[in-house]
Image (spheres, rainbow, N blue to C red):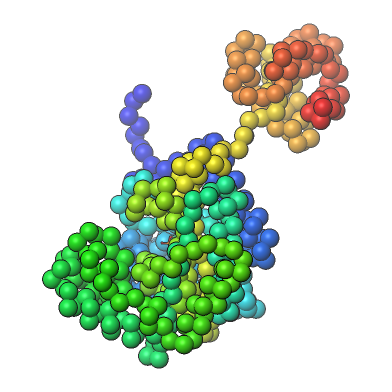
Amino acid sequence: MAEPTFRAPKGTRDILAPGSTRLRALVDEFARQADNSGFGEVVSPIFEDLGVFKRLGESTDVVTKEMFDFYDKGDPPQQLALRPELTASICRAYAEHRPVPPWKVWYEGPQFRYEQPQAGRYRQFTQVGVEVLGTDDPQADVDVIVLGARFFESLGLVRIELALNSLGSPGDSGSRRAYEQALVKHLEQNRSRLSTQSQVTVERNPLRVLDSKREQDSAVIAGAPVMVDFLDDESAAHFAAVRAGLDAVGIAYEISPRLVRGLDYYTRTTFEFAAPGLAGAQNAVGGGGRYDGLVEDLGGPPTPGIGFALGVDRILLACDAEGVFGAPSNTVDVFVVDVTGGTEALKVCDRLRQAGIATDRSYGGRSMKAQMKVADRSGAEFAVIIGEDELACGVLTLRDMGDSSQQRVAAGSLVDELIRKRTL
Ligand code: AMP
């Protein structure tokens, strides 16, 4: 085959059927469960004012290194960016529309990050997620986490691990400050043993050093103080209530004191779902947490929030690894073969499709043999054959593709006959 002139841009892919059917089925299942838990869908723009995403934190990789940003054609031009995630857009929407809290929303759609592509890491990928804005009740955290865990279960995944941590609360009175001071002290004392990259990160955002997967950093990280030892009373009580809620519902989790996650806005609860069947750095299939300051950062009223985003592409890889949630069948029920010019096929297809019977045909006035071959390949249960003979008598030949039996059916009773056969 000749080299194509254009290919999909680096880090993006065309997802063709049946892969696309499977992706749609997964999103539909998520939508069903989110609706079932009292969440409403929000469809927000794929691009936003760059400022919306900048509020995610100036030391977040997604903001500093991975943004697909551009100027529009306005005068003066506005700087926009393709969304790298949806929490910021949802908080912007909350600040803009001021819905009655608690606002429980779910979403799905493509996200864009300029990352180095590899298996399970793309520049355009699909996320599904939920957010609850306007309550700091730890039971909202529990409800959100349970929804994620039950969703994975419903797909048939049994090897998903849930890691849980609390990052305390920011601000002068919060526990984060005391912890950061202790962490910086530890990292400074061990500076020479850290990788060059982490030595830079200590200055910009010490918490993110804990995220480092570099071998050279592992010993210093292992000896670092942990946030949960520094929680203020309120954060400790919140964390205890989240754990108690998960225990009450029977959701298994591991406390993971070094789970800080890549986005800077998290406060208190953070969590991650991992699929150990996937390759190391790409085994996170979803994650989330509390972000009690984000709506305010985006110009809204002080509003606590909790949510998660799940990576659909990676969940499907995890399903492959466990051999579950295969592609649903998207074959048609009936294939129409017309050797009288095609007009009859147009009419029969229209009638069957209107009756909800999935129907296909071929084009180009091909021979009976060629059309039957396509009918065979289509996986259809029945072929409807229209020859000159049938046309003259006002009938159609209905062929069962399984046992090759054939019968003639009056054109007007085809739909009824097919419905009768399918209910047998
Ligand atoms: P985050 O928004 O970074 O918390 O990511 C939430 C989930 O989205 C991750 O756990 C991944 O499953 C998925 N994800 C994040 N980045 C990518 C990417 N570049 N390609 C595919 N999936 C991704």
On screen, residue 383 versus residue 258, left or right, reads right
Q: Is residue 105 above or below residue 133?
A: above
On screen, residue 187 versus residue 296, left or right, reads left
Q: Residue furthest left?
A: 192
Judge by depth and name the residue closer to the eye, 260 or 186: 186
Q: Position of residue 126 (x, y in %)?
A: 48, 53
Residue 129, by quadrant, is bottom right
Judge by depth and name the residue closer to the eye, 392 or 307: 307
Q: Is residue 93 visible?
A: no
Q: Position of residue 412 (x, y in %)?
A: 86, 24
Residue 382, by quadrant, is top right
Q: Is residue 320 visible?
A: yes
On screen, residue 187 versus residue 235, left or right, reads left
User: Residue shown at 22%/66% (left/top)?
Assistant: 219
- Quadrant (top left/top right/bottom left/bottom right) for the C terminus: top right
User: Residue shown at 49%/77% (left/top)?
Assistant: 239
User: Residue shown at 66%/55% (left/top)?
Assistant: 32
Quarter of the displayed picture in which ligand 1 can be seen: bottom left
Judge by depth and name the residue closer to the eye, 62 or 169: 169
- Quadrant (top left/top right/bottom left/bottom right) for the N terminus: top left
Q: Position of residue 122 (x, y in %)?
A: 38, 50
Residue 168, by quadrant, is bottom left
User: Residue shown at 60%/45% (left/top)?
Assistant: 25
Q: Is residue 86 above or below residue 269?
A: above
Q: Position of residue 284 (x, y in %)?
A: 42, 56
Judge by depth and name the residue closer to the eye, 341 or 154: 154
